[in-house]
Image (tube, rainbow, N blue to C red):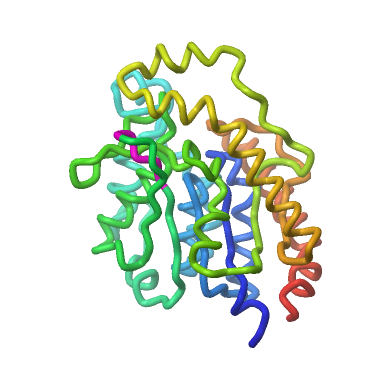
Amino acid sequence: MPKIEETALIFEGGGMRASATAPMVVTLIEQGIFFPHVSGISAGSSNTVNYISRDITRSAQSWVEFVGDPNMGGMRSWLRGEGYFNSRYIYHEATQQGSSFPFDFQSFDSSTTDFRIGAFRVSDGEEVYWNRASIADHKDLMLKVQASSTMPGIMPFTEIDGEVYADGALGPSGGIALDAAMQDGYKNFVVVLTRPRDYVKKAPRNPQFFRTYFRRTPHVAEGLIERPQNYNHTRQQLFELERQGRAWIYTPETINITNHEMNVAKLKSTYDAGMEQTKRLLPSLKEFLGM
């Protein structure tokens, strides 16, 4: 069996830092490198569904040109209660056929690629993963991508079937869905991260701030407080798998933006640097996959 058939693809989140990793989505599609399983959390869930639908244009524009859409968000959107990123527009209005940024659900639905999209259930602090069997239609898929990507304090929580969800990065995985791929039986991994290789997430300076701000949703507060520990732990697991020859890891060499960057020129610069790096590393990836 070719190694790729035993390998899962994983996309980390990170908001607009996904402008550094979208080039990997584009390149994989262009090269015809299709994994049997792909998972993502937060911005990684958008990369996941774009990859599965094999939409090069959408994958390339999601984190650059689309951000220039005045309906995307900003401070006015946040003050109106729509969130700094207007998730209703991003995941629902804009994704319809004939709209500004349509999503090809038919191609997505006809794919045989399995997937996991992770979100954080606010009521009990559990990490929930949705797979292909969990998706009813276009609207349902986008609602779950929205839930996975709902950054607390920046975007309103997302409700699905009476439960409220927040960004999947608050769960035990720390935002990297390695656990989901392992649960589905995979032993080898290609992991696309949005932080540099030497990055270590620091513990919050004032945990009480989160407990006060999110006093009505205490599991969210604890998820934010515990995230650095969970995130760093998952990265340590990944680098150990890399040492064992079971993981190939992409980490951006150039990333000088925050997760809420809205400057299109900066995002384009980050994307271009990511594309240059991706092309340079492509032979190494193919070697790992035995291609």
Picture layout, residue 83 above or below residue 19:
above
Point 62% across, 71% down: residue: 7
x, y (%) of residue 70? 40, 34
Residue 120 colored in magenta in the image: yes
Residue 151 colored in magenta in the image: no
Closest to the observer: 106 or 166? 166
The image quarter in which residue 82 lies? top left
The number of discs equals: 0
The image quarter in which residue 22 lies? bottom right
Picture layout, residue 55 above or below residue 208:
below
The secondary structure making up most of the magenta span is strand
Q: Which residues are magenta?
A: 119-123
User: Quadrant location of the N terminus?
Assistant: bottom right
User: Quadrant location of the C terminus?
Assistant: bottom right
Point 55% across, 33% down: residue: 227
x, y (%) of residue 4? 64, 77
x, y (%) of residue 26? 60, 63
The image quarter in which residue 188 lies? bottom right
x, y (%) of residue 78? 36, 23
On the picture, is 290 further left or further right than 186?
A: right
Closest to the observer: 99 or 63? 63
Point 43% across, 39% down: residue: 167
